[in-house]
Image (cartoon, coloured by chain):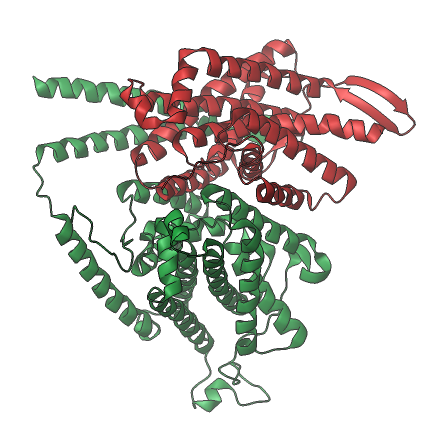
């Protein structure tokens, strides 16, 4: 029981990271119907920017910690957003209106480019960092079995909840969110009604990159090591989360992220750690067979 | 007056480009993190601001050239070729390119400049050509987006490796067996997932590719895990081995030649050439058979296909299985050429490269695949000296080619038959 509870807490943390990245995939897919393969690498850039900001500020050495983390967070969001914006402007916008696979190929190209860009500029070695937020609460100390909730996990979960509330306010209440949803429903009609479609798509990429950068910062804090390759597997799993939840649906992305976190953590805890990714993809296949449009996705209406 | 206005717009744009580039590059390029030597846990900075500024200047320069290009394009009044002429020209180009490529391919090993390196690179390019043609059946003809094609390549390679090392079977028996096993893997994957459409299929095939790789990596008893399988038997010339001395008659004894290691390399080159041409021939022929027609029809409109009684699942399944089979053939060739297979060779990036070859070549175009393979694989081979920048250039090339030629280098996506010619032609 204690073990189970501990794993539940761990999975919630991991699920938050996946969920934040998955939103970026699902939003872009909802509007322009493309898989933004480079999104995982935008997340990786976010983690590198946070790492650099942490080293620059000397986080953990004297400076008031919440303030330092806030600065790191803002720096990561700002710089990674610019990456997201540039990505859309350079690699995707020229191909708007072209056939679907074209954008997929530039996305793959951008992913390869970003990975190798970071490898060349930052080196291929892994980057370790000292734990920044230490300590935590411990409940149920029952011999060897301990259930603990570290401050870091609380930090991650709280940040996720705050971000998601800001984000859902942005989508449901502001003019920006309104035009975003309009574009999602019908791009041509939205344009006819005077919505600046290009700007809305740019904003979507910026929001997606911002959320991914926060996930990147959490990844650095939680795992303590990063390298240029983390974006690939994390990105694929986050995309799996988006598909699992029903691609195009934002609550679906969060639910999918939590589910993937759950599956991965529990599979590693109770079965074999080597096959945890096999389990993730296996469950994706099973879910899609029975619900071909994901958990919260709406079935497409077939038109002739 | 107009010019002055233009210049100020361009200047503003260049300034903006510079600003964006600065934000992008200063932290990542300028501040390189290194593990400090003093205490082995902390990170310190290695300042590279000079390089960062050079790159920023380069980005602004590229943007400026872009403006000049635009400007000259607007001023010139272009003569637009009619769509029909263009199509005819492309058809002719395809034919000529095919003839030239075939001629060059067959004579290449006997050209004066053909040393071991050239033939090796050509063999590599041909392997990708074959994989591209195999995937073209799935993506180009049937319109199914497969992001895990390398899984079938892996199944073929491991089938060959395991069959030949544990049962001592010859290449010519293992090759069809590997193909059949790969096709079986294709059916196994396809059966549950082919009801899915478009991008759902893409992510499931991607997942399948990863599953196969992870199984190869972790099932130590069967696949020898990350160490891979080594000492895979080399192919023989229909029973005559390429060795200096052997119990049986060797290849050079059979033909009364001086022994040379080039014999095997040239033999492997012709082997993959013939395998690739077989794939090509098969694709051209099957486009005229009912099943090939059904694939193309499915690609164009699935709902209409169902209405006229084509079973989409079965049709897709055949495309998947046949594509997988050719992937398996290429895989067993890969295994016998390398003499060693390990899970490292079958990562997602390979799938991405094969898909890029198909799409950049122009979907459905056979000769386009050849051109794209030569451009992508050949150009990365040119950058071999600059190991680090090789994949960087590769990614950039993928983006640039796609933006310049969104429909592929040689696009040819016409269905084999059309009932009515389209109105605008």
Residue A152 occupies which quadrant of the picture? top right
Rendered colour, chain A: red
Q: Position of residue B347 (x, y in %)?
A: 54, 50
Rendered colour, chain B: green
B393 or A179, which lies in front? A179
Residue at point 53%, 49% (across, down): B205
Q: Which residue ends up furthest to the right in the rendered image?
A: A143
B256 or B355, which lies in front? B355
Residue at point 54%, 49% (across, down): B193
Is B416 placed above or below A96 here?
below
Q: Position of residue B325 (x, y in %)?
A: 50, 65
Is A41 placed above or below B10 here?
below
Is B27 placed above or below A165 here?
below
Residue A99 left/right relative to B90 = right
Q: Position of residue A9 (x, y in %)?
A: 74, 25
Residue B91 left/right relative to A173 = left
Residue at point 79%, 17% (across, down): A137
Residue A204 occupies which quadrant of the picture? top left
B371 or B312, which lies in front? B312
């Amino acid at each position: 029981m204690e073990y189970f509870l501990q794993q539940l807490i761990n999975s919630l943390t991991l699920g938050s990271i996946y969920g934040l990245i998955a939103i970026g995939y699902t939003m872009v897919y909802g509007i322009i119907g493309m898989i933004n393969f480079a999104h995982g690498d935008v997340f990786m850039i976010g983690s590198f920017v946070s790492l650099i900001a942490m080293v620059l500020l000397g986080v953990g050495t004297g400076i008031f910690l919440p303030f330092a983390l806030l600065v790191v967070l803002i720096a990561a969001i700002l710089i990674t957003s610019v990456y997201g914006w540039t990505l859309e402007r350079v690699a995707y916008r020229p191909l708007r209106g072209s056939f679907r696979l074209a954008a997929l190929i530039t996305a793959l190209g951008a992913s390869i480019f970003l990975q190798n860009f970071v490898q060349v500029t930052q080196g291929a070695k892994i980057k370790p960092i000292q734990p920044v937020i230490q300590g935590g609460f411990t409940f149920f100390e029952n011999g060897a079995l301990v259930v603990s909730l570290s401050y870091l996990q609380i930090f991650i979960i709280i940040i996720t909840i705050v971000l998601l509330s800001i984000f859902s306010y942005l989508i449901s209440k502001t003019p920006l969110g309104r035009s975003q949803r309009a574009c999602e429903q019908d791009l041509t009609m939205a344009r006819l009604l005077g919505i600046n479609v290009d700007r809305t798509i740019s904003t979507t990429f910026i929001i997606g990159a911002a959320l991914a950068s926060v996930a990147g910062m959490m990844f650095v804090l939680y795992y303590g090591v990063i390298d240029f390759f983390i974006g690939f597997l994390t990105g694929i799993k986050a995309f799996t989360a988006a598909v699992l939840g029903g691609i195009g649906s934002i609550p679906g992305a969060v639910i999918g992220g939590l589910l993937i976190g759950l599956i991965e953590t529990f599979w590693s805890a109770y079965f074999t750690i080597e096959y945890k990714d096999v389990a993730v993809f296996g469950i994706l296949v099973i879910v899609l067979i029975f619900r071909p449009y994901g958990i919260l996705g709406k079935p497409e209406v077939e038109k002739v | 007056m107009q010019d002055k206005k233009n210049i100020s717009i361009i200047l503003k744009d260049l300034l903006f480009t510079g600003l964006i580039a600065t934000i992008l590059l200063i932290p990542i390029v300028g501040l390189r993190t290194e593990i400090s030597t003093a205490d082995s846990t902390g990170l310190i900075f290695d300042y590279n601001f000079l390089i960062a500024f050079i790159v920023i200047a380069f980005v602004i320069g590229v943007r400026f050239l872009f403006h000049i290009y635009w400007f000259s394009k607007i001023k010139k009044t272009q003569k637009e070729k009619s769509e029909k002429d263009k199509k005819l020209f492309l058809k002719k180009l395809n034919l000529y390119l095919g003839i030239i490529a075939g001629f060059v391919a067959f004579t290449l090993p006997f050209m004066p400049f053909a040393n071991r390196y050239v033939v090796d690179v050509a063999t590599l390019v041909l392997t990708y050509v074959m994989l591209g043609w195999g995937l073209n059946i799935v993506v180009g003809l049937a319109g199914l987006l497969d992001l895990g094609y390398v899984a079938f390549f892996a199944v073929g390679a491991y089938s060959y490796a395991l069959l030949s090392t544990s049962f001592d079977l010859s290449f010519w028996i293992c090759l069809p067996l590997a193909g059949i096993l790969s096709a079986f893997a294709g059916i196994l994957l396809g059966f549950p997932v082919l009801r899915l459409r478009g991008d759902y299929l893409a992510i499931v095939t991607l997942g399948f590719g990863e599953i196969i790789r992870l199984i190869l990596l972790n099932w130590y008893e069967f696949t020898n895990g990350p160490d891979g399988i080594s000492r895979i038997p080399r192919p023989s010339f229909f029973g005559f081995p390429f060795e200096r001395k052997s119990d049986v008659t060797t290849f050079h004894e059979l033909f009364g030649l001086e022994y040379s290691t080039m014999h095997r390399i040239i033999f492997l080159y012709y082997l993959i050439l013939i395998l690739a041409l077989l794939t090509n021939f098969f694709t051209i022929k099957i486009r005229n058979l009912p099943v090939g027609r059904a694939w193309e029809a499915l690609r164009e409109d699935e709902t209409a296909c169902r209405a006229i009684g084509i079973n989409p699942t079965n049709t897709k399944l055949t495309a998947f299985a046949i594509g997988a089979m050719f992937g398996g053939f290429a895989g067993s060739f890969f295994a016998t050429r390398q003499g060693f297979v390990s899970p490292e060779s079958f990562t997602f990036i390979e799938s991405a490269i094969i898909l890029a070859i198909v799409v950049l070549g122009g979907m459905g175009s056979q000769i386009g695949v050849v051109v794209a393979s030569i451009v992508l694989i050949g150009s990365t081979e040119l950058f071999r000296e600059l190991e680090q920048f090789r994949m960087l250039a590769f990614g950039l090339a993928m983006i640039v080619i796609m933006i310049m030629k969104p429909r592929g280098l040689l696009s040819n996506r016409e269905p084999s038959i059309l009932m009515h010619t389209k109105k605008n032609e």
